[in-house]
Amino acid sequence: MKDLEPTDQQMSEVKKNTYWKSLNELAQNKEYQKFTEREFPENASELTDGVSRRGFLRVMGASIALAGLAACRRPVQKILPYSNQPEDVVAGNPLYYATSMPFQGNLIGLVAENHEGRPTKLEGNSLHPASHGSTNIYNQAATLELYDPDRSRSPLRNGKGVSVEDFAEFASSHFSNTNQRIAFISEANSSPTYNGLKNEVLNKFNNASWVTYEPFGEDNAIEGTQIAFGQRVRTLYNFDNADVVLSLNDDFMGSNHPNGITYARQIAAKRRMNNTGDSMSRIYAVEDSYSPTGSFADHRLKLKASEIESFTYALASALSGRINGLNAFSGINNQFTDHHWISVLADELISNSGRSAISAGAEHKAEVHAAVGAINLALGNVGNTVSYLEVPHFNEQNNRQAFADVVEQMKTGNIDTVVLVGTNPVFTAPDDLGFEEALSNVSIVVNLSHYVDETARKSTWHINRAHFLETWGDGFSFNGARSVIQPQIQPLYNGLSEIEFLSTILTGNLDKGYNLVQNTFSGYYSSGFDARWRTILHDGIDTQDNFSAASVSLASSFEVTSASETESSGGIEVVIRPDPTLYDGRYANLGWLQELPDPMTKITWDNVALMSPNTAAALDVDNEDVVEINVNGKSVKIAAWIQPGHVDNSITLYTGYGREGIGRVANRYIDYTAGGVNTYPLRSTSAILYSNAEISKTGDAYEIACVQDHHSLEGRDMYRQATIDNYKENPAFATFKSVHGYDVPGMREAHELEKEAPVSLFREQEYPDNISYPEHEPQWGMAIDLNSCFGCGVCVIACQSENNIPVVGKKEVKRGREMHWIRNDRYFVGDNVDEPQAVHQPVPCMHCELAPCEEVCPVAATTHSEDGMNQMTYNRCIGTRYCANNCPYKVRRFNFFNYPKEYLTTGDDPDIIQMAMNPEVTIRFRGVMEKCTYCVQRVNRAKIEAKIETGSPKPADGTVQTACQQACPTEAITFGDLTDEDSVVSQAKSNDRNYQMLEELNTRPRTSYLAKITNPNPALALDINQE
Amino acid sequence: MSKYEYVPEPALVKGNHDFASLTRLVTDVNLRPTPKGWYLAMIGANSLLLVLLVAIGYLFWEGTGIWGLNNPVGWGWAIINFVWWVGIGHAGTLISAILFLFRQDWRTAINRFAEAMTIFAVMCALIFPGIHVGRIWVAYWMFPLPNQMDIWPNFNSPLLWDVFAVGTYFTVSFLFWYVGLVPDLATIRDRATDKFRKWTYGIFALGWTGSNRHWWNYEKSYMILAGLATPLVLSVHTIVSFDFAVSIIPGWHTTIFPPYFVAGAIFSGFAMVLTLMIVARKIYGMKDIMTDDHMEKMNIIILVTGSMVGFAYMMEFFIAWYSGVEYEKAIFLLRATGPYAWAYWTMMICNVVSPQFFWSKKLRRNVYFTFFISIVVNIGMWFERFVITVSSLATDYLPSSWDYYSPTIWDALTYIGTFGLFFTFFLLFLRFLPMVAVAEIKAVLPQADPHNYDDNDEYQAPEVEVPESQARFY
Amino acid sequence: MSTNNDHTDSLHGILAEFKNPKQLLDVASKMSKSGYHKFDTYSPFPIHGIDKAMNLKKSKLGWIVLICGLIGFTGAVAMMYYMLVIDYPMNIGGKPFFNAPAWVPVTFELTVLFSAFGAVIGMFVLNGLPKHHNPLFNITRFKKATDDGFFACIEAEDDMFDTDKVKKLFEDAGATHIEEVYE
């Protein structure tokens, strides 16, 4: 691997831009008022965490964990702790309960850490197939959503606050007329209780229609299977068996994929290299914009989204000659027929028949999915790497068509009542449908949503929705595991869950979700239900694999309907995708997600128009230049951003930004400072993914807060990788010596003295032969496997949630003051400038044994602990920032302002957001330094428990997990005791890929990296070289 | 005949002055009523001082965030200004101590003046370590005081060495200055006519009589102080440079820093003395004492130290290349060509090029040109500290962390404000204290030497002994 | 020459003024040669060679400074050793607790600081200063001592003191004025 020369055109241009941008910054030294001042009102009250918690308890009455004490209160709903059930709550000891989070209608099993009735942290449920103990960014941010002070706090009737009882009253009267024409527009929901109620509803109201509407989702995939196999089934991959994976513009590892956690875990497991003997799968990605999956692939081909279809057909027809079942494609001839990738892929797929998997991006046409299905079937992958599931709650109609029809009905005034459950079509519906206008033709609109959002404001009745951590629910995971959603707290704002809402509409009285869910589940178990119920709650999962695999065969009618010769349209096309951190916008008010850098661009707080360097040059735009994008009449103004590796003549836009009036975080500000741009207006039913556009430069500029200014490694060795062949030849390729050709300075002398580490001029406090590191203490260390990291950023959010890291706002991020303790560096490397490889490197504190930061602190505020951690004493810190300067890894973060106060004082009473804080971690105040602590609070809890049980403060391996490690879906991070040779981390560090960052500085980092291994196809590698 | 020509040392005091006229020339400034111009200058200085107080007040209220600092760049203008002021503060002690040990009598004309400047410059410098910390109200934790945390400062930290070095430097410079002042305060005491002056100057003169028994101990003490101050003045900037040199940041971690910081300090210090002297001697008509010869001698020192600094810049590049450390190499290339090149070349032109003009005797003796260069030099030295502090932090090891530092208005106001502090004190000094060491300058008059009197105790101007070979020139 | 005084204060000594440094130097050696001890000369600046003329002993100041310097040195080392090794040892960047090289600067600075205080305070103590009143200040003319006057004074406490002899000595030395100084 060679890095981009600083001299090369494209990249150096990117660099220059960054700097010139910064130089402009120099010009505008206007004293800026902090973003947070706008974010929160001035009359901010200063409640301490304690006060607000008490205030909350007073307001909310008995919380679940206090049920024992508060037994006199009604209703008592017993739930069971996940692990050991305590006789009573021991204050300060968190309890862990199993629950699940609905995400795009499917459940992800979680475990909630519950402090005195206050869920503060969500972890994955290792028993749950959609989680395996890890999470995605949305799971982590869910706690913040629960305590979001901007959530709707009461039902509204024509915008006026009313009580839930009023709604029940209205429901019983209004819905007594069972002949009215009702349209139910619902989000995707797998809950058996919910779907049961749905059926009751449809039975009761004989003129009712029910459509499931999601702005993004698997609708096209389902239609695809309908075309290919004549069945509406769900495509489920099993990458455990896939040696070759081809992604056709499908970011199946990314956080936005409903089954992303599982897929990422499978892919990473398939590529884990414990020694040179191991083999790994090979991943091909064909995509337009750079996605985490694309950056993880061994080979990546840039194609415009509009070309994917032709490419798929070309591949299919290439295969059709060599395997049966693809006759429909034979003879197809298009611009890709002779593309060198087609032949290479064909060979590869055929030689791996049954062990390959092809997937297509969810938003691509049904035809593409059909073709992919046909190919997978023909290759014999079905049953091995791909299976098709019969999902009971799938509708029998084409959801998007049905939605369009209903809107048409509304327009023509054929609908009396619309009930919107959890969706926000006014904001997200394709523009050409004119949903908002249609809604105005309907006399009664009832809406259930978390926020008083765009749709809620257009509704006659808005019901504030209860968060999934507040109420009972149930549902299925993506692959069909059934679980119960256990509430962790009484509803903060007396909201209704979707099942309570439906049953109120149905019955007119306010039924408790608890009963509804229990009824459903008691239906499954004729006998021994109570015991079973306990187990379900305890494990967080009932039964696996409730979706039976469909036996599929190519439909006799199957043919390539759409024009086989889909010429890629000339000109520039615009592609609209869900945002990698806000999805479709429903999470827009969560500061953690707004401030989480985009995995590929590292941009926070905004969406941009992503384009390739060439396209930018053609349009004569630079980063932060505002362009006007015009798609058949509709136009938006948005800042341009140059994304190396993006396909030319294509612009990628993310949705979810530009929200108005839904919350203090998401709101887009008139003075154009944050909040991004609403890109939905460019989306239409005909062009759901891409469409041609005219782009024009406006001449304005818009500041973008990007956490990484510089994208080239400058030929440095922080990131090390090799192809699998080179690795087998030279297993020690990652060591300093083989990278540089000479030893670390001081190592030769060390060899003579038979020492492990380079010699020093002084007698070090060195483990183990020193009083500073007593034998009885564990010695903590971390290893990060770069071969597993694909940059999703869940570690960042998990850390933020665990360690009470404040959100600082766009202005501060722009100033380079983001507070994340672990950051995810993303570099562009590679020989080929047009197709740079993107690599990800998570960087937490290295916990150096010879820590440069410690020596320079004048007040000894940062020192070394007996168990080898570099620790920060906040109370002692006076904030000279010398330690941060002297940290070669730049992992220390400084509280330039009183961030926690601005972050935690919203002016509400009680300050509910403060309940999201972890009571075991200090809130840092203005003027002190902070940094990654290896989650010292978890470490010490484990040490104390170990001491009590075994007498030794060395916890068993695996009992301590850092937040980032626990959340990581690919298990890239391992952490543990280095004094135990058998510990996972010791094993990882003994791997020959193990290397230390900046080893030559002799800082002796306790955090080390395992170099990345790629598995390129020699045939394709050859081709690239020939180019 | 030899080709060498004998050039007698120029007289240290021009014009035919005797002891009394010198006394009058210097001390009348303090005794005559305050001129209007002084009040105007004082108003200017005070308003700048007010700016400083406001800037610090707002900093205290809001936090370090009002400055332009960010994640890689934890130190900005505050530290730059600190180093810059301390550097300026080197000339005084150097002149009074080192030149004293070298028996350079010409120092007597400017040492009082320079020492005063030193003390006020160091005061300005001392502000910054105090206020640049995140929690100003606990900055005193840097001192080894018993406290409720039962924890002591970390004596391994260069920042702590700084506290001791600059603190000691300030104290010793002040003592040195005061000891020199005592006989002159006695002079003013004895010349003062009004009770108030008699009384106040009397207090600070400590009852000095001019007894030669006292002079005996006094000279001894002065000599010892000079002997102590000499290594001290060299140590101060050495230790300040340790703030950088002891760290591991590329461009900081280098052994050349101590000598080159000291050279730079003397460089900027002399420039500042010249800037002030040229103005003061004009206003107060001290041209007889602070002569063009003094100016020329100082210009030569500026030329020498300037060239030393220039040499150090070259050396840095050579060492970076010679070390073979890629990060060292990168940082120096980045300084010259990267985002901060503009600052780097400003520094080069001001510090390396501008002093070279002083090779010409004509320019060395040109008051206006000297004044101009003296200011250019201090601009250059400020940029030197900027380049060192900021560029190394902004682009260090991990490219991912590289970020651009740009100051805010508050950085600028704080810096400008320190001039308010400096000039406020300097004006007070000019008004109330003798700006020339009267006793010392009397001692270097030829009349002060008993050997210059004939047997009738009449003054005989000293003969210039000319070597035989050149006798005919005289 | 005003010797007619009617006040009854005790005589402090006799003060004489001289034209220039040379005369002062001569009278100084005269006084010491004639065996006077409690005498002194006053000049606006130290006069080269007058120490020999008055045969003054070597100043003790050097010793004072040396002692102070040693106190500073040992004090500094002791303080740091107590704080970082005995009282609260901490593992700071893996450095040894007794990190001698890092302690050099502070030790040096404190040594210099203490020495400087010794040099200044010692000097004033040796000179018996501060002393706000001095009988000589009763003599208006003595103000010139800090301007351009050169004075010699023999104190009445001297064993050999005799008003006439002293005046005679001063006259012979060419004093321009001679005055009796009273407490």
Image (cartoon, grey):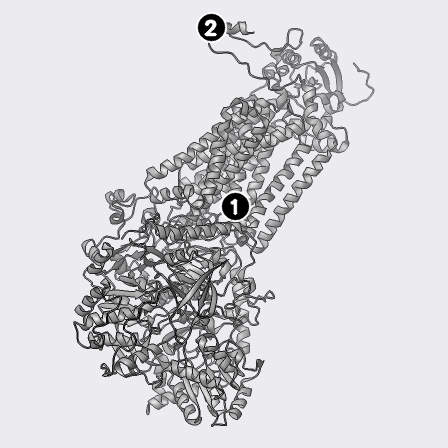
Determine the CA span between mark 2 and mark 1: 60 Å
Earlier along the polypeptide chain: callout 2 or callout 1? Answer: 2
Disc 2 and disc 1 in contact, CB within 8 angstroms: no
Q: Which residue is mark 1?
A: B77
Location of residue A60 with respect to A913 vertically, above or below: below
Compare residues A286 and A632 and report the one nearer the observer: A632
x and y percent of residue A61 in the render? 52, 80
Label 2, secondary structure: give it.
loop
Question: What is the quadrant of residue B420 in the picture?
Answer: top right
**What is the chain letter for disc 2?**
B
Q: Inspect the image, locate mark 2, and give the three-letter code of the amino acid beneath it.
A: Met
Which quadrant is the C terminus of chain A positioned in? Answer: bottom left
Q: Which residue is mark 2?
A: B1
Does residue B154 appear left or right of residue A834 in this picture?
Answer: right
Location of residue A761 with respect to A565 vertically, above or below: above
Badge 1 density bin: few <14, some 14–19, many ≥20, Cα 10 Å = many
x and y percent of residue B37 in the render? 71, 35
